[in-house]
Amino acid sequence: MNIEFTAFPRATEGRGASRRMRRAGKAPGIVYGGAAAPTPIELDHNALFHALRNEAFHASILTMKLDGAATRVLLRDVQMHPFRNEVLHVDFQRVDENRKIHMKVPLHFVNAEVSPAVKLSSAIVTHVTTDVDISCLPKDLPEFIEVDLSELDVGHSIHVSALKLSQGVSVVVRGKLDPVVATAVVPRAQVETEEEKGVEAAAAVAPEADAKAAADKGADKKDDKKDDKKK
């Protein structure tokens, strides 16, 4: 997917200049990396805000148009206002086509509804993580990685090692050797309900068993009395 956006050179810097820029409907930013020096930029705030709501804008190589030139960049950081829908600052990095990049890529979970965990046990599938950090050349960057849940069963998990990656793409793992991506568990309330049903069923069967045992015992006594009379 080729996503383009327009940026403009920013001549002024500092908090005061940034506040004036935001009041004018602009968002301050910077683009860095490559052979060129870091370049302060500004963007239309509303256009940027709506672009940030697009998942692909965060995990794709973007085309930035600046001063009539097109530059391929990655979104690296976004600073948002603590309680307003306002972008305070945004960072982009220039892309070198011949150098590997590290990028967080979203996971798309599919086929949970046909998994044994859901179909047979009414389990809940938990997405332990929703993105992974990958390494690849810019040309190999995937927009997302699909996680197939169709074989997931209760008590089992899908790990990073089970993800199907495109050629040239590898997951960057830190800490745990093979982190869990998704798992399936039966809700505790459901387990307790099943246990209660089992107890109730056993309780319902118990009186019948006691009555049968009493009847059998009574029959045995009658047989004993008959035997005594015969004697």
Image (tube, grey):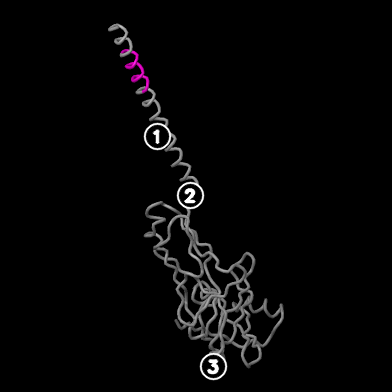
The residue sitting at 38% across, 30% down in the picture is 205
The numbered disc on residue 187 is: 2
Amino acid tagged 1: Ala
Query: Based on the displayed image, in which of its 4 quarters is residue 197 positioned?
Result: top left
Q: Which dot, 1 or 2, sits closer to the camera?
A: 1
Q: Which dot, 3 or 1, sits closer to the camera?
A: 1
The local secondary structure at tag 3 comes to strand
Residue at which label 1 appears: 201
Percent across and percent down for residue 190 are 46, 45
Amino acid tagged 2: Pro
CA neighbours of label 1 inside 10 A, class few (<14), some (14 to 19), many (20+)? few
CA neighbours of label 3 inside 10 A, class few (<14), some (14 to 19), many (20+)? few
The residue sitting at 42% across, 38% down in the picture is 198
Amino acid tagged 3: Ala
Q: Earlier in the sequence, mark 1 or mark 2?
A: 2
For the residues marked 3 and 1, what is the alpha-carbon distance in whole angstroms? 76 Å
Q: Quadrant of the N terminus?
A: bottom left
Q: Earlier in the sequence, mark 3 or mark 1?
A: 3
Name the main secondary structure of what is drawn in magenta.
helix
Q: Earlier in the sequence, mark 3 or mark 2?
A: 3
Percent across and percent down for residue 13 are 70, 83
Query: Based on the displayed image, in which of its 4 quarters is residue 154 positioned?
Result: bottom left
Q: Is residue 92 left or right of residue 185?
A: right
For the residues marked 3 and 2, what is the alpha-carbon distance in whole angstroms? 55 Å
